[in-house]
Image (spheres, grey):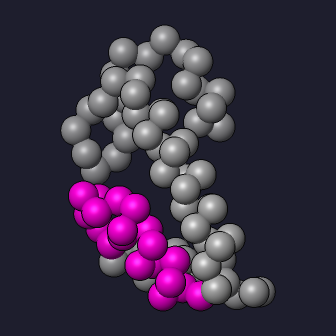
Amino acid sequence: MLKSLRGKNYKWIMPGHVMPMGPEFFDKAIQYYETTLKIIGESPDVKTANEKLIKAYPRYGGTFLLDLFLPAFYKNK
């Protein structure tokens, strides 16, 4: 979905709990989700994935959210 929105000519994006951004938001969000899925695929457990994501994005806040959503990816692993 983000990739399809990236091609639109939006001047401002309201991504949520951050300041408004320009179209660069889509590239950053796509990269984050792709990196997250790659890390999850390569990590044997939640703890390892959590550590790798924090290392990959050290300036991102809300790391407590990783504890909430990462376990769902490991239910059937």
Q: Position of residue 59 (x, y in %)?
A: 24, 58
The residue located at (58%, 67%) in the rendering is 39
Task: Give the residue furthest to the top.
Answer: 9
Q: In the rendered view, does 66 fall on the left or right side of 64?
A: right
The residue located at (30%, 67%) in the rendering is 62
The residue located at (45%, 78%) in the rendering is 50
Residue 40 occupies quadrant: bottom right
* Count of marks placed on residues: 0
- The answer to whether residue 7 is visible is yes
Image: magenta residue range = 45-63
Q: Position of residue 20 (x, y in %)?
A: 27, 32
Q: Quadrant of the C terminus?
A: bottom right
Task: Give the residue furthest to the right.
Answer: 76
Q: Position of residue 65 (x, y in %)?
A: 39, 73
Q: In the rendered view, does 23 fall on the left or right side of 49?
A: left
Q: Quadrant of the N terminus?
A: top right
Q: In the rendered view, does 53 fall on the left or right side of 49?
A: left
Residue 63 occupies quadrant: bottom left
- The answer to whether residue 72 is visible is no
* Residue 41 belongs to the span the image colors magenta: no
Q: Position of residue 56 (x, y in %)?
A: 40, 62
Q: From the viewer's perspective, is residue 68 above or below residue 34?
A: below
The residue located at (28%, 63%) in the rendering is 58
Q: From the viewer's perspective, is residue 60 above or below residue 1?
A: below
Q: Nearer the viewer, residue 77 or 9?
A: 77
